[in-house]
Amino acid sequence: MEPKTLFDKVWDAHVVEKIDGGPSVFYIDKHLVHEVTSPQAFSGLEARGLKVLRPENTIATPDHNIPTENQHLTIKDELSRKQVETLTANCEKNNITLYGLNTPHNGIVHVVGPELGHTQPGMTLVCGDSHTSTHGAFGAVAFGIGTSEVEMVLATQCILQPKPKKMLITIDGELQKGVSAKDLTLYVISQLGTGGATGYFVEYAGSAVSSLSMEGRMTVCNMSIEMGARGGMIAPDQTTFDYVEGREFAPKGDEWTKAVAKWKELKTDEGAKFDKEYTFKASDIEPMLTYGTNPGMGIGISGSIPNEKDIEPTELMSFKKSLDYMGFDLGDKMLGKKIDYVFVGSCTNGRIEDLRVFAAAVKGKQKADSVTAWIVPGSKQVEKQAIKEGLVEILEEAGFKMRQPGCSACLAMNDDKVPAGKYSVSTSNRNFEGRQGPGARTLLASPLTAAAAAITGVISDPRELF
Amino acid sequence: MSVDKFITLESSYVPLPVENVDTDQIIPARFLKATSREGFGENLFRDWRYAPDGSENADFVLNKSEYSGQILVGGKNFGSGSSREHAAWAIHDYGFKVVVSSFFADIFQNNALNNGVLPVTVSPEFLNDMFKSVEADKSQKLVVDLEKQTISLNGKSEEFVINPYKKNCLLNGFDDIDFLLNRKEKIEAFEAKN
């Protein structure tokens, strides 16, 4: 039998039909739904007189648009409220499980899926959100789709997809002190560029990847889309099984034993071919920071913004436009630059380990007066755990306040907007123009680097502080 | 939703020679609060098109009356970032039927096709020719022929690639949901087996 990659194994097992010269009819095991990209899909379904085919394989949670303060009150913004209410109504009408606002399992869809055990190895998952790639950390094929495709999945539990090409990214060795999964992914994206993996599905491998916790793996897979990849995945192993076991929707008893035996087969066979391969050394990775307006524009924190001679002439105009927006110059050093906001949260870094790292770093220190900080847990469960572990007290003693869960300032659909011209060190995934509010300037970093900036008020090397 | 049929188009074009135009630029997140598909064209490229006070930014190409047409020509890696289909809706609603670039992000490409907007990938050289030609003559036209899969500028043509299934959908105005609904028995058989 021809050796197969991990991706091939999961993909091929979900092809209902291959169409000549076309895409495949591709079966979806789990459909995740949120309030922003689903209303038009539900109304499309209704206009055709159709019902959701498999409501039992669909879960929903409002996350993008919700406030992160006073969630017990009615949502003030009328349009946001209408979207959240529309999601509730659509779920009720179609018998879809909804983790609604103010219920114990509400949160960012990519945090809620894994923590409840909905996400399992070997599955296919989609959501109308590009960071669905997060779930690939479990050895699942998971990717973001548009609203027309959401409608397809609601109607038929399938979408039409051409099979992407395959890329292997191997990172060997040990990450240095102060370097996390977020730095690893920002480093890889800075090497490949923001379109470097477009058309590919990525498998991450190597000792630096397999030694990551599940939450670290989720951070890495989450950012796959930022280099254009359709998705990213990591072969499941004991770390994965230990994480999934016992979660509410994970298999139990005999079913569990059977499932694990099956999941153990989910790895790339020796000799299996990839269309492209990259290898990196973990020891080359510093704490990372972005300086521009796409996630590929990242450097080691002690480095400088490239000079004109380092930029392709065809790319220079876009590069300079980006630096103009950021208020930076070619060749600038990043250390010591003043910052105004710190955001810790999002589907990239809003999990309990991220809050633990941040809290441990700021413990016994004080937030700089000049910094406004938003610490936003990824879900109600993360919030509950942070309270239980005493993280909230540590944060409060250091001058920080934890807000309520949601996507928040990652995309600033709610009131959590960074003002124009202000600099924000953010643990989220995108530094696009205006992403955190019109005119806001975003520098992507790890929770530890965000802690260093929050304490000092300037870009600081966390290795020297903590 | 059925999509518009697309066969050929001859039109002047609007150049946007910026690389990595992400979907947050095409339609910023704060305009994603609607529950219908209509009206997004108003906020297409909102933060490039308008100043914070709502006045038009005279330097932005959509505000220059000398540029017009149903074709948008963008720099490399067009449509990266968020999967929001609102980006394709905004482009369609504004009146563009074709987007040209030397490289497209995957999800945007799917979303465009699902809304009857044809993404055409050309070589970097040809893209550059388009940017130069339209600077010399703002009424310069492009001819896009989906049947033949060609795009032409001043008598110079390039072929472009499109999935034959998607081509058939666009030529006939079919959509994927109809196609999938016709596969219901196969889908149920697949479920029974797994």
Image (tube, rainbow, N blue to C red):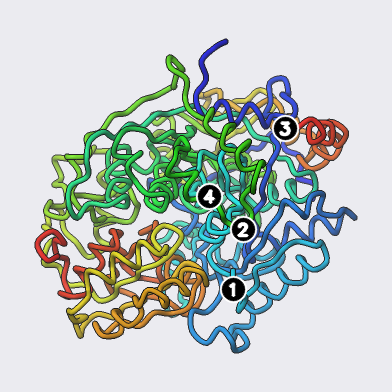
- Residue located 40% across and 31% down the image: B124
Q: Callout 4: helix, strand or loop?
A: helix
Q: Position of residue A336 (x, y in %)?
A: 11, 67
Q: Which residue is mark 2?
A: A248
Q: Is residue A205 left or right of residue A360?
A: right
Residue that numbered label 1 is attached to = A104
Q: Which of the two marks, 4 or 1, is nearer to us in this view?
A: 4
Q: CA distance from mark 4 to mark 2?
A: 9 Å
Is tag 1's residue or tag 3's residue first in the polypeptide sequence? 3
Q: Tell me, yes or no, if residue B136 can be seen here.
A: no
Graded by Cα atoms within 10 Å as few (under 14), some (14 to 19) or many (20 or more), the crowding at tag 2 reads few
Question: Which residue is the site of mark 4?
Answer: A244
Q: Nearer the viewer, mark 2 or mark 3?
A: 2
Callout in the foreground (1, 3): 1
Residue type at mark 3: give it.
Answer: Val
- Does A227 sit above or below residue A440? above
Q: Amino acid at mark 2?
A: Glu
Where the C terminus of chain A falls, by quadrant? Answer: bottom left
Residue highlighted by disc 3: A25
Q: Secondary structure at mark 2?
A: loop
A438 lies left or right of A148: left
Cα–Cα gap, marks 1 and 3: 36 Å
Residue A290, percent from left and from top: 26, 55
Left or right: A359 in relation to B99: left
The amino acid sitting under disc 1 is Pro
Q: Tell me where residue A261 sits by quadrant.
A: top right
CB atoms at circles 1 and 2 under 8 Å apart? no
Residue that appears at 35% across and 83% down: A401
